[in-house]
Image: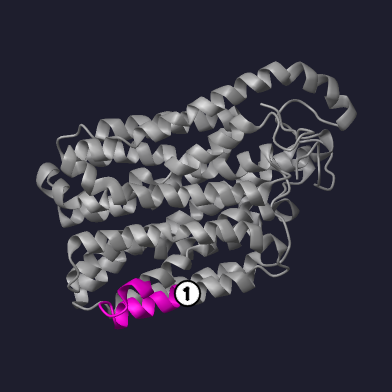
């Protein structure tokens, strides 16, 4: 598929827009549908405390592994083919795990589904960069919002659907949303194939090379080493601190509130409410933060909301429960900021894919153990004090990353392998190229 900006703002890109949005809607459903059903899964499949802890670790672990692997897959096969592969993995994993009769096959096929979604996490930002370089903020706002919608609706419907049918239907039905991703991308592929001769005629005039590549002047940026880049490390650290807090809430908010005296159904609704609060900030952040000279000011506001929510839930979990969940939920603006910064701190589609893969790979790896440690500390001490103190540490880590990504600099500025090493041809200053930014 071609890497260009159409003369009409949306003409020729509707399939890509719908594909990005439906993919975003599907990315978290397989994760957030399971916690409300753990009571049934304990009896039906034999889940224990240790296997529940392992289940909680799977999303960040798989997101980390495939976050690091996906840029190489994109480089070899292209964005769209990798996207299709991720959808097929997600669909297969969700459907087969819903038929599992024991805890270990369920965990294994959950890992397959999460591998697909881990790839999808990385693919989305560069797809936005490729098809909508002129509408990065707007499209990012749309897809981050739908990601929040998907995160919220699956736990809200999990128990009612399981009551009407079974937990297998409740868990497996979200594969349909993943499968629907292929329809708009199929339409986009047909449109691009039909337009390819026209693009070939225009390419010499606008300086484009082969479809999906950069002009020769920008070939050097095709070899990026992200661990050389302060931007890449900063975004990874920022995402690690943010995701650690989020996964603690998704794993422990319902059992924590239930242990404080809240009934199980209300505790599950609190988690769905927490998730859906990502909606307003997902819309706000991409439209507000790009206008700011110092994004760390917005990040600091969200960090204060996180801190107030943590303190409230620790000090007074039953008095003001919904206020504390509201504050923490609005703090999720840090996640929307992280996804936005992938494109604000890269100049090219390839730079975006490398930054997306590295930051999510390292970030989710850093966050992966925190939910397990959070519960282990509580079990060892019999108190939640040190567990909640650990959330404070996560906030500090997040703000360190925020300081590193605050200056307006790009991954291509510090992660490019010298031309003589990369043998990628002459290097030039990275910038606009046939609509690529």
Indicate the position of residue 294 as horizontal and vertical percent values. 69, 70
Name the residue: 24% across, 69% down: 257
Q: How is the image coloured?
A: one colour
**Front one among 189 and 119:** 189
| Left or right of 318 in this view: 435 | right
| Left or right of 337 in this view: 218 | right
Indicate the position of residue 248 as horizontal and vertical percent values. 34, 63
Indicate the position of residue 326 as horizontal and vertical percent values. 40, 69
Q: Is residue 390 above or below residue 166?
A: below
**Quadrant that contains the C terminus:** top right
Residue 396 seen in the current view: no
**Front one among 437 and 33:** 33
Residue 13 seen in the current view: yes
Q: Quadrant of residue 101?
A: top left
Residue under circle 1? 305
Q: Main secondary structure of the magenta part?
A: helix
Q: In the structure shown, which secondary structural element does the residue marked by tag 1 occupy?
A: helix
| Left or right of 215 in this view: 261 | left
Q: Is residue 135 above or below residue 90?
A: below
Q: Residue furthest bottom?
A: 315
Q: Is residue 253 magenta?
A: no
Name the residue: 22% across, 78% down: 383
- Find the magenta span and give its range: 305-324
Name the residue: 30% across, 54% down: 56
């Amino acid at each position: 598929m071609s890497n260009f900006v159409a003369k009409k703002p949306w003409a020729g890109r509707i399939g890509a827009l719908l594909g990005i949005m439906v993919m975003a809607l599907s990315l978290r459903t397989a994760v957030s549908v399971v916690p409300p059903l753990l009571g049934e899964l304990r009896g039906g499949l034999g889940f224990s405390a240790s296997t529940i802890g392992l289940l909680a670790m799977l999303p960040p672990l798989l997101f980390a592994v495939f976050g690091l692997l996906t840029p190489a897959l994109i480089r070899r096969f292209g964005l769209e083919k990798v996207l299709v592969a991720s959808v097929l993995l997600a669909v297969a994993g969700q459907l087969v795990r819903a038929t599992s009769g024991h805890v270990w096959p369920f965990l294994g096929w959950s890992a397959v589904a999460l591998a697909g979604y881990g790839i999808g996490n990385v693919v989305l930002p560069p797809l936005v960069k490729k098809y909508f370089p002129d509408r990065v903020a707007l499209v990012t706002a749309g897809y981050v919002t739908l990601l929040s919608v998907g995160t919220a609706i699956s736990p809200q419907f999990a128990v009612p659907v399981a009551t009407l049918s079974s937990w297998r239907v409740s868990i497996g039905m979200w594969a349909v949303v993943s499968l629907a991703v292929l329809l708009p991308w199929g339409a986009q592929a047909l449109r691009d194939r039909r337009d390819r001769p026209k693009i070939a005629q225009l390419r010499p005039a606008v300086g484009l090379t082969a479809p999906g590549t950069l002009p020769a002047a920008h070939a050097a940026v095709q070899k990026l080493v992200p661990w050389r880049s302060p931007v890449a490390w900063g975004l990874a650290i920022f995402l690690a601190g943010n995701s650690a807090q989020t996964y603690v809430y998704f794993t422990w908010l319902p059992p924590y509130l239930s242990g404080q005296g809240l009934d199980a159904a209300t505790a599950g609704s609190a988690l769905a409410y927490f998730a859906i609060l990502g909606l307003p900030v997902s819309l706000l952040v991409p439209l507000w933060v790009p206008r700011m000279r110092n994004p760390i000011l917005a990040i600091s506001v969200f960090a204060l909301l996180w801190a107030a929510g943590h303190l409230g839930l620790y000090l007074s979990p039953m008095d003001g429960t919904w206020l504390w969940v509201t504050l923490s939920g609005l703090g999720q603006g840090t996640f929307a900021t992280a996804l936005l910064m992938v494109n604000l701190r890269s100049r090219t589609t390839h730079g975006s894919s490398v930054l997306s893969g590295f930051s999510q790979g390292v970030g989710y790896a850093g966050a992966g153990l925190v939910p397990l440690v959070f519960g282990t500390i509580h079990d060892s001490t019999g108190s939640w004090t040190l567990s909640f103190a650990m959330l404070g540490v996560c906030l500090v880590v997040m703000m360190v990353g925020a300081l590193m990504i605050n200056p307006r600099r790009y991954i291509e500025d510090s992660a490019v392998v010298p031309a003589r090493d990369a043998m990628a041809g002459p290097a030039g200053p990275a910038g606009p190229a046939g609509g690529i930014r």
